Image: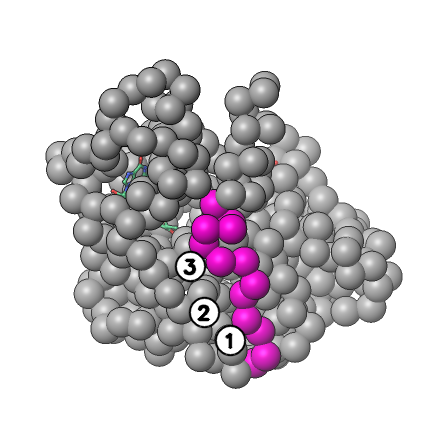
Amino acid sequence: MEKTSKIYIAGHRGMVGSAIMRQLEANGHTNIITRTSSELDLRNQQAVQDFFESEQPDYVFLAAAKVGGIHANNTFRAEFLYDNLMIEANIIHAAHLAGVKKLMFLGSSCIYPKMAPQPLKEEYLLTGPLEQTNEPYAIAKIAGIKLCESYRDQYGSNFISVMPTNLYGYNDNYDLQNSHVLPALIRKIHEAKDNGAPTVTVWGTGSPKREFLFADDLAAACVYLMENYDGRELVNIGTGEDVSIKELALLIKDVIGYEGELEFDTTKPDGTPRKLMDVSKLHGLGFKHKIELREGIALAYADFKEKYVTA
Ligand SMILES: NC(=O)C1=CN([C@@H]2O[C@H](COP(=O)(O)OP(=O)(O)OC[C@H]3O[C@@H](n4cnc5c(N)ncnc54)[C@H](OP(=O)(O)O)[C@@H]3O)[C@@H](O)[C@H]2O)C=CC1
Ligand SMILES: C[C@H]1O[C@H](OP(=O)(O)OP(=O)(O)OC[C@H]2O[C@@H](n3cnc4c(=O)[nH]c(N)nc43)[C@H](O)[C@@H]2O)C(O)[C@@H](O)C1=O
């Protein structure tokens, strides 16, 4: 990418899109274009085609999606499938029509089979049944990957797909029902400390394991791969290390300084037992994350306090 290349970030106000924007700006890119969802509803095919035809971006980061944690995925099953299929089909097809030089599609570690061997290698895709709570979202993401592969196979389009692990960071969603576990526990534990509550409720058994990557590390990886990777195969993006949900809750308790107890609500689903990424391909390509979990939680907590508690 040249510093003056026209780069469209779809989803620039989200946690990932905003981190990609910071990374590109830090690298000196000066021609970044964006639209909010109210300016351009990416589910609208004609609007997306008109936008690509008039703007003619050189590069596209596809970080717009309907996103949420285990409860949101399981509850809004229709929107997680429909919105995500429409957004990615519209953007990828319009990028093809407009002759975009390169596009990056963001998948997710939840697209791998629920009981796949660990760590998850890229080639395990489509080798077994999916986790039930996020099957619609995973099916949509798999369709996005297949769109990128198919436009590459048929038209030679340089469309690449990356698979981020569970993410957290600045501009995360702290909704108690619809967020992911890490921001949800930051908020719950912060509020319990503030209110002097003796316990905090953690969903599920606490035994599932998850890998967490700070969104700015993901953004750095995305920009790095946009500049250095042109392959057809997926690339996992993660840290290669995971913790149980109980260990995560204890770590967040420690960072926040809360001394109450954890209670586990086993009426809530655990989801996939484990989804640890094999990141050997990413490391082989020359990229490694920088921010470790405790440091990242402290950064996210400071952001939470500034934006949500103060507001
Ligand atoms: N968060 C995570 O743990 C993980 C995320 N990912 C992937 O990373 C990407 C970004 O996720 P994240 O940043 O967390 O999500 P966010 O919810 O923070 O941001 C999503 C963005 O998508 C935009 N968007 C959603 N629907 C539409 C629409 N109909 N039209 C236009 N824009 C729309 C929103 O725009 P606006 O703000 O303008 O409304 C928003 O900025 C997604 O592809 C997601 O699947 C992958 C693995 C894990
Ligand atoms: C990124 C990824 O995110 C989703 O998958 P997930 O990893 O299962 O998501 P999660 O972060 O919401 O939960 C992780 C674990 O944590 C437990 N848990 C405890 N207490 C809370 C809690 O308070 N909130 C939430 N949300 N979970 C909690 C929860 O029960 C589960 O065992 C996707 O749907 C999927 O589509 C996707 O891409």
Q: Secondary structure at mark 2?
A: strand
- Crowding around mark 3 (Cα neighbors within 10 Å: few <14, some 14 to 19, many 20+) is many
Mark 3 sits near ligand 1, with its Cβ under 8 Å away: yes
Q: Which mark is residue 165?
A: 3
Q: Give yes or no for residue 280 being in the magenta stretch.
A: no
Please, which residue is most extreme toward the top here? 195
Q: Which residues are magenta?
A: 285-297
Three-letter code, disc 2: Asn
Q: Are marks 1 and 2 in contact (CB under 8 Å)?
A: yes
Q: Is residue 175 toward the left or the right of residue 215 in the image?
A: left
- Is residue 104 visible in the rendered image? The answer is no
Front residue of 144 and 206:
206
Residue 56 pos. (x, y %)? 77, 57
Q: Counting residues from the N terminus, which is met first, the one under dot 3 or under dot 1?
A: 3
Most frequent secondary structure within the magenta stretch? loop
Which residue is labeled 1 in the image? 282
Q: Residue at x 68, y 33 (%)?
A: 39
